Image: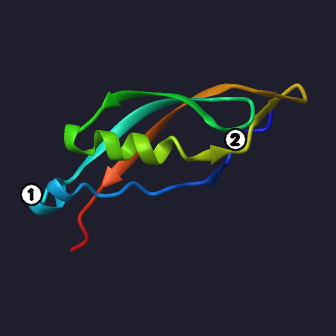
Amino acid sequence: IKEPTLIHRVDPEYPLLAQISQIEGVVILEAIVDREGRIESLKVLRSVPVFEQAALAAVRQWRYSPVILNGRPERFILTVVVSFRLEK
């Protein structure tokens, strides 16, 4: 088994409303990654609603090296935590 590696990460855009309101939080997603390492589907497990769309839009662009099982690439599921923190 060769484990996946995140090879392309896109940071989410901090929503303007959250910046103005000084809101921080996390979005926890379940991702299904296809055999080529692309995000096939995402499901929100927990979130602060104001951050949900920004997290989904960013993670949809992420790419992973494929999981290799018995010499063949396979789909896999992982949990992704996207944090939104204001810089102090």
Write down the quadrant of residue 13 in the picture: bottom left
Which structural element holds mark 1? helix
> Are the residues tagged 2 and 1 within 8 Å (C-beta)?
no
Taking the image as shown, residue 71 lies to the left or right of residue 81, namely: right
Q: Position of residue 69 (x, y in %)?
A: 82, 27
Residue under the image location 74 percent in, 36 percent down: 36
Callout 1: 10 Å neighbours few (<14), some, many (20+)? Answer: few
- Compared to residue 54, the image places residue 46 above or below, namely above
Taking the image as shown, residue 59 lies to the left or right of residue 22, namely: right
User: Outermost residue toward the left?
Assistant: 21
Residue under the image location 72 percent in, 39 percent down: 3
User: Outermost residue toward the right?
Assistant: 71
- Callout 1, which amino acid? Ser
Q: Position of residue 8 (x, y in %)?
A: 62, 54
Residue under the image location 55 percent in, 55 percent down: 9
Callout 2: 10 Å neighbours few (<14), some, many (20+)? Answer: some
Taking the image as shown, residue 80 lies to the left or right of residue 36, namely: left
Taking the image as shown, residue 29 lies to the left or right of residue 39, namely: left
- Callout 2, which amino acid? Pro
Q: 9 or 15, which lies in front?
A: 15
Q: 21 or 2, which lies in front?
A: 21
Q: Mark number for residue 4?
A: 2
Location of the N terminus (image quadrant): top right
Write down the quadrant of residue 14 in the picture: bottom left
Which structural element holds mark 2? loop
- Compared to residue 20, the image places residue 83 above or below, namely above
Residue marked by disc 1: 21
Q: Mark number for residue 66?
A: none
Write down the quadrant of residue 71 in the picture: top right
